[in-house]
Amino acid sequence: MLDITPDTQNAIRQRLAQQERDRFITTHPKSKALAEEAAAHWLFGVPLHWMSDWSTPFALQVTQAQGATVTDVDGHRYIDFCLGDTGAMFGHASPPVVQAVQREVARGCTTMLSSQDSAWVGAELARRFGLPLWQSALSASDANRFLLRWVRAATGRKKLLVFNGCYHGTLLVLDETHTFSSGPGGYARLHGLQPDALVLGKPIAGGLPCAVYGMTAELAERAVQAKRDAPPGHSGIGTTLTANRLTMAAMRATLAEVATNAAFDHMISLCSELADGLRACISRHQLPWCVTQVGARCEFQFGAIPPTNGTQAEALFDAALEHLIHLALLNRGVLITPFHNMLLCSPATTRADVAHMLQTFDEVLARLTAAGVLI
């Protein structure tokens, strides 16, 4: 490695990052034009400001996502290891979900009434995740908020201790939105945990806005009693479009035909190959980094020791380096999650996809190491 000062290293990083930005600008003229057009009416130039948090100089504009591949308006195709930051963990446009959505959208998307899929979905959630009683939401964020309200009502305790990105109350509540990658029954079932309540979101309905939260029978009984004891006019917890026909049908298709045992076997096996390949590449370039894995997801982190909590994980962040690596990978046809260094394998991901990712990652690290960025 080169013997250079931190200031020189930062200057080299900035120069290489600008080269990658220039390359992106040159090769994405249609995305640039559409991003400029959208900027006139959307804050930050996008319908959701997270869409501008990628390392690109302007928002990438997508025309299609299929399986583990994304295509942009300029005709570039990317192997997708981001998968909507878990929202499309089971692949884009899975045929069973597409068929279910096409069928149900013609029958009416929402009625604020139960549908024929509700009983099956409820029974399957109970079977997989070990909690007998469930409710629905439109996102994991909503599900967590709703569940906290139910827990407060059921226990009579209003305060929560917030720490390290988590919170503590009277009960064990787990959010499996990102750990559903562990297996068909999620992290808790795999490791024998027995939560009082559980949240599942993002991939549960094949990428449609949907989440669910389950409770033990005891907690559910207390929550129901709290609802019955509420003063007149109390409207309960939820939103009008929650549990609409479209998302219930998509959730049934996902649980029945997409998120199968065989699918998880494939996803986790490939992710293990990916994680091992990342470790080998990191070792080859003599970098003090580590790789962590949770089932079908893995992440490389800028520290030799894997973090065990949120504070430790945050201490390993290097935003400038992440952006440089992410943009270099994107310019070479690979997408990874923009907010950290997470990669997911879906049922549609292939060994060829993993091999291409590892080869590209190795090329990017070789370039950065030779330039003196990684010292």
Image (cartoon, grey):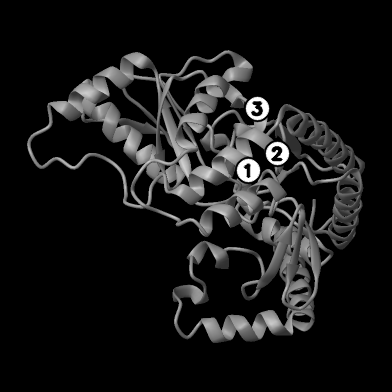
Choose mark 1 or mark 3, whichever is in front.
Answer: 3
What residue did someone put label 3 on?
Answer: 184
Answer few, some or many: residues within 10 Å of disc 3's Cα (few below 14, many 20 plus, some between 14 and 19): some
Figure label count:
3
Query: Where is 32 relative to 136, above or below?
Result: below
Depth check, mark 2 against mark 3: the one in front is: 3
Q: CA distance from mark 1 to mark 3?
A: 30 Å
* Sooner in the amino-acid sequence: mark 1 or mark 3: 3
CB contact under 8 Å: marks 2 and 3: no
Q: Given contact means CB atoms under 8 Å apart, are the residues at marks 2 and 1 in contact?
A: yes
Q: Report the front residue among 320 and 240.
A: 240
Q: Position of residue 188 (x, y in %)?
A: 56, 21
From the viewer's perspective, tell me whether residue 174 is left or right of residue 253: left
Q: Secondary structure at mark 2?
A: loop
Q: Which mark is residue 316?
A: 1
- Residue 12 in the image: above or below residue 312: below
Where is residue 305 drawn, in percent x and y? 70, 31
Of marks 2 and 3, which one's residue comes earlier in the chain? 3
Query: Residue, x 88% and y 60% (percent of image)?
Result: 367
Q: Between residue 321 and residue 27, name the one nearer to us.
A: 27
